[in-house]
Amino acid sequence: MVGVVLVTALLTAPPSADADVLRQAEDSFAEAVRLRDDPEKARPLFRRSADLFEELRRRGAANPALFRDQGNACLLADDLPGAILAYRRGLRLAPDDRPLQQFLAAAREKVVYAPQSGAFARPPVPSRPPWLPRLPVRGGVLLACAAYTFGWLGLARWWMLRRGLWLSLGLAAFAVTALLALAVAAEELDQRAQNARPLVVIARDEILLRKGNGAAYPRRHETPVNRGVEARLLFERGDWVQIELSGGETGWVPRQSALIDGP
């Protein structure tokens, strides 16, 4: 991870102030790497680098490289929840980014799960079929329209010439249209679900899920969750949030014990 090259430019040319923040983030990371044999000195610099990348995000910067570098800085600063949140944000933009996938998998291996807890609080299992392509909704719609049009053109040519090749091409184009439509629908549903139920990452160890928004409520589950556990936000009330784990288990946790994806 230390050898990963830091992002040297944002996808769009940043204003001078943003470029200065980016340079500071890169310099802090590079200095921390230089001092990696002295964790007491390196860790605060990794923390500063991660905070500067977060400042860029708050200013509107968002691309896979930025979140990859922020996640790496968080992980090296011993901020496991922040690293997982950053990697998940990057994968939301680029689901097929291999380095992000590998870094997220490595971070998840550091999460401490309760012994004999089974699938409780484990990372979510992708429900999307691996063969279904991922496409931006607008780009997928345009491709589907083009394939649909080509399909009708193929059938029209077959009707005029009665050649099997054109029939095969037309039917293949309709099959591609159906696949693209399915991919676009899946992407749209996934985006709506993420917007409706933002990602939550537990930020502290030994957090109990309770039946209500207060420490006086009884436990929902006897098994606590530790930092790095991923969930979805269901509801907020005062200083407490209701979350749902990947297995469907729900409960309330203190707001200060969770990182919530958002602006």
Image (cartoon, rainbow, N blue to C red):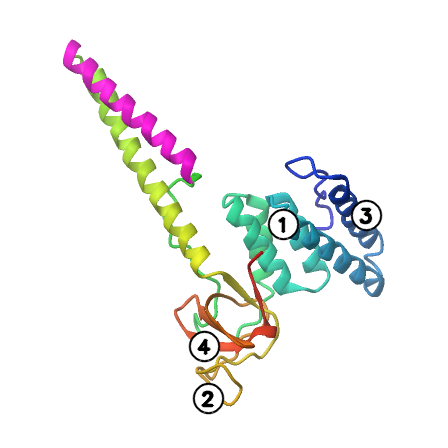
Q: Are marks 4 and 3 in contact (CB under 8 Å)?
A: no
Q: Which residue is mark 3?
A: 27
The amino acid marked with disc number 3 is: Asp
Q: Are marks 4 and 1 in contact (CB under 8 Å)?
A: no
Q: Which residue is mark 1?
A: 67
Predominant secondary structure in magenta?
helix
What distance separates the C-alpha of mark 4 from that of mark 3?
A: 41 Å
The amino acid marked with disc number 1 is: Phe
Q: Which residues are magenta?
A: 137-161
Q: Are marks 1 and 2 in contact (CB under 8 Å)?
A: no
For the point 33% across and 31% down, which residue is it? 144
Q: Which residue is mark 2?
A: 218
What distance separates the C-alpha of mark 2 from that of mark 3?
A: 48 Å
Q: Which residue is mark 4?
A: 251
* Observer-nearest of 146 and 75: 146
Q: Position of residue 193 (x, y in %)?
A: 41, 56
- Judged from the image, the secondary structure of the residue bearing numbered disc 2 is loop
Q: Are marks 4 and 2 in contact (CB under 8 Å)?
A: no
Q: Are marks 2 and 3 in contact (CB under 8 Å)?
A: no
Residues packed near mark 1 inside 10 Å, few (<14), some (14 to 19) or many (20 plus): many
The amino acid marked with disc number 4 is: Gly
